[in-house]
Amino acid sequence: MSDSLQVDAPRSVDELQAFVREQPHVLVVGNQTKPPLWQPFAKSHRLVSTANLSGVMQYEPSEFTITVLAGTSVAEITSTLSDRGQYLPFDPMLVQSGATIGGTVAAGLSGPGRFRFGSIRDFLLGVRFLDGHGELICGGGKVVKNAAGFDIPKLLVGSLGRLGIITELTFKVFPRPVDRLTFRMDCDSHESAAALISKLALGRWELDALDYVAGSRTVYVRIAGDQPVIESLAEDVGRFLDRSTVRLDRDDANRFWSSVNELRFDGGDEFVWKTPTTPVEFVRLAKWADEQADDEVRVHGSAAMTTAWMSAKSPPDQSIAATGLMLRGLIPESDAFLSDRQPTDMERRLKTAFDPLARFP
């Protein structure tokens, strides 16, 4: 980031409201762990950070809910929950990089745990945010069974600060599993890997995560629970599929899943983008990556090949990443969305309702 780039960081919601009302164009950032989401607008919008709006506002372990300010680091939240044997099952991403919970929600990022438990939007119960007038809006609530205004929190997931500035969030949390076990299976082709993943995804087991490394044609499976249970499940999977599995020790497993959550893949990670896929589309992407010279592009499939994480040493081909979201690396004359898709009428109406003055990008 340029030394001349100014980022304001209000110390209270009141200060943030005043700031929004004073500026014609505003873009919110957290700890700036995903530069492509804000860099394209740095010249046209005044940047404001929620980093000073940090802390756990309310935590009810017995109710399995936690309320935090948007600038709270995900690392602080996971540590707080871990102390009480709880966690966020969707596997928050970029934790070690310093991501804030507000930025995580705005980017709509979920890790490998999304396969079993659902994405971040499935755990968001309530939200407070500032609209384009600087008014504080509340949606959802702080209890799991609350339904009032429930769609507003989900609407802000993946909104990238276009609809408002998130100030506070409430999540439901789960008990942390006692143990985890990871094993891998090598495949002959992307097609055989897709077939294997389909069997695993539709099988009788409750798998915790199901990922695929296209470069090595390797399927990774994670199981969570009590030690005797996960041992039995791992053996049952191998017997049912009639194929050998290679179990990872705890350190290797932790390194593998951490690399996924931190978007660090084997190879050049100067550019990283996310693309929603189906297994058929993923196989097509993986084959295209195989054809690139010098391992230029790496492809990692997450949540049973429904998400493709793609990394490259140079900017991605727009035709390949047409529906992608850039998370690392800046493409000149492009914003975070690698797409020329125009907003739908519903999207335009929502934007007008939340941001009638067009303060946000």
Image: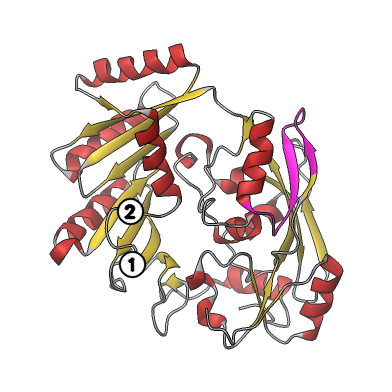
- Taking the image as shown, residue 87 lies to the left or right of residue 36, namely right
Q: Nearer the viewer, residue 175 or 54?
A: 54
- Callout count: 2
Question: Observer-nearest residue: 229 or 79?
Answer: 79
Which residue does the numbered mark 1 point to in the structure image? 321
The three-letter amino acid code for the residue at tag 2 is Phe
Residue 47 in the image, given as x and y percentages of width and height: 65, 78
Q: Quadrant of residue 189?
A: top left
Q: Position of residue 70 (x, y in %)?
A: 70, 58
Q: Position of residue 342 (x, y in %)?
A: 48, 76
Q: What is the span of residues highlighted in magenta in the rendered image?
A: 58-73
Q: Is residue 54 above or below residue 145?
A: below
Q: Position of residue 67 (x, y in %)?
A: 76, 46
Q: Secondary structure at mark 1?
A: loop
Does any portion of residue 175 appear in the rendered image?
yes
Q: Circle 2 is placed at which residue position?
A: 265
- Image-quadrant location for residue 255: top left
Determine the residue positioned at 45% across, 52% down.
262
User: In terms of image quadrants, where is residue 156?
Assistant: bottom right
Query: Would you call the spot at circle 1 few (<14 residues within 10 Å), some (14-19), or many (20 or more)?
Result: some
Binning the other alpha carbons within 10 Å of mark 2 as few (below 14), some (14 to 19) or many (20 upward) gives many
